[in-house]
Image: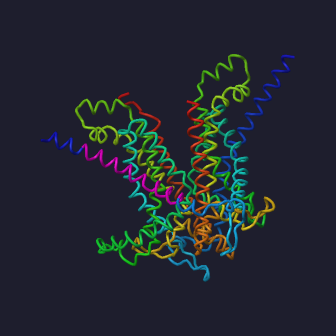
Amino acid sequence: MSKKKKLTASLGDKTLRLLTLLMAISVLVLMVWMGWQMFDSARPSIDKFGFSFITGRVWDPVKEQFGALPFIYGTLVTSLLALIIAAPIGLGVAIFLNEMARSGVRSVIAFLVEMLAAIPSVVYGLWGIFVLVPWLRETVEPGLAKWFGFIPLFQGTPLGFGMLAGGLILAVMILPTIAAISVEVMAAVPNEQREAALALGATKWEMIRIAVLPYAKSGILGGVMLGLGRALGETMAVTMVIGNRPDILPSLFAPAYSIAAVIANEFTEATYDLYLSALVEVGLILFVITLILNVFARLLVWSVARGPKGGIS
Amino acid sequence: MHDRLRKYRNRMMMGIFIIATLIALIPLFGILGYVVKNGLSALNWEFFINLPKAMGAPGGGMANSIVGTLIMVLIASLIGIPVGILTAIYLTEYDRTSWLSIGVRFATDVLTGIPSIIVGIVIYTAVVLRMGHFSALAGGLALSIIMIPLIIRSTEEMLKLVSHSIREAGYALGISKVKTILKIVLPTAAKGIITGAMLAVARVSGETAPLLFTALGNQYWARSLNEPIAALPVQIYQYATSPYKEWHQQAWAGSLVLISLVVILNLFARFVFRSRSN
């Protein structure tokens, strides 16, 4: 009797083990399959256009001409702009939360910053169209053109819809990522580091500069890269404000196009196979860029957040 | 003299960090403010019970979109939550260090970082093209792929927090591993796991990009899971980019409903569950 009971128990053990193992493998398979599916669907376009797909400046489905450079350009410019704005602010928020705020203030502000990440991107887009874009068109862009108009970045008609709008909205969207990861890696800095700096008579800022930031540096960089990854792949908000025109122009006021936006706009309208395949290839480029970026960023964050190796503590 | 300069610089930097934090919060209140203001004025009872109406006809609503979103989030949860939790159990309870677990963790990170529109492309080429039509199933499937890595991550973290002595106490009593996991470890971590699941649900209910060419959207009620179906975020997108003022109003109202859903899920997950589990 007892033997039988033991047998059924081990059967349960085996079942759960097998079931969880199957699920774990399926996650691995899912990743590989997604990559393969993208590559396979993009192949007609890859075979036909080769490398010129990436360097081509003309995107004209009617003439079967597909060059993805305008989309790559628009994606990179808006994402970098977002990074330039969001990285310092995100780092400032992280320092405030980690080194300055009392725990009550800290939890409220941390929650609010998380809410910023929880707002659906289509709502960002809606707000972008009806609040941000008019404000840029009527106030910000004329102002920039007046004072900095000698720089090509700020020339041209202030339309509102364009790369500046895309970059700004992305900055808001990736700020929580950068802040959250920076908080995480700065919290991993051992307190002894801070105390040592303070004991030497450092002011708070000097302590942060000498003892905290160098230690958390690579982790913060990882957070910034994760933010960049999010910016590159963000679809709806950018699609709604970037202007959707496949041009490569130096001015930030000019309408442009991003990789994700062209997929969102044209995918269901792709009337022939090669067109669809070209759109998938554009997606594949995005897939590969974000993949590399994410892997690299995770490694950086992981190397810091898993804690000190040796060192004082 | 030098000391005063240092103190001055210290105060200046602290001020900069406070200003950075305030700047970061401006868009949050800006967006919430506009959504509430414009949304409330357009929101009425008909919004919740009516279908979208043709341009100019009064009393249009988004009933089908709200139901469509709920249906697809339900499908995604039915797939994503079990797969995610079981995978996390494998990673923490059976195998923490082998190449397979490292590979699965890597895959989880990769899946987390994939832009959601890519998921839409994959499901379109693999499911929609093969079935020959857009459907609620394809949409739910796309959302589940976004959900799985989120659930794995949060569940794994919660299971890791369960102390080893609890597991060992189970084994010491001669309780089988499966019972230790199901009756001791999982209940201990249950609140955290539910919190993670709710946050994942909140996240996917706002997703638009993966639904654009899987669920497609629909101005009417979908009669089965095999038909194109409306979704709240997709409907908001279509209305927001239309040229009509009435539809813009509807988009604001839809956004208010969507944001309320997401915020309520977030608040619930964070405060109700976290306060009791800690």
Image-based side of B32 in relation to B169, left or right = left
Instruction: Tell me: residue B276, above or below residue A144.
Output: above
Residue at horizontal 61 percent and vertical 37 percent from the top: B156
Is A58 situated left or right of B193 in this image? left
The quadrant of the picture occupied by the N terminus of chain A is top right
Colour mapping used in the image: rainbow
User: In the rendered view, does A102 fall on the left or right side of B179?
Assistant: left
Q: Quadrant of residue B8?
A: top left
Residue range in magenta is B10-36
Residue A274, position as x, y percentages in the image: 66, 74
- Count of marks placed on residues: 0
Residue drawn at the location 59% of the way across and 59% of the way down: B255
Magenta highlight: main SS: helix
Q: x and y percent of residue A10 in the render?
A: 78, 26
Q: Is residue A84 left or right of residue B230?
A: left
Asked whether A250 or B191 is in front, the reply is B191
Identity of the residue furthest to the bottom in this view: A63
Image coordinates of residue A264 in percent, x first then y, are 60, 67
Return the x and y of residue B40 as percentages of the image width and height: 57, 59
Task: State whether residue B277 is above or below residue A32.
Answer: above
Query: Is-magenta flag for residue A141?
Result: no
Is residue B25 one of those drawn in magenta?
yes
Quadrant containing the C terminus of chain A is top left
* Front in this rendered view, residue B151 or A109: A109
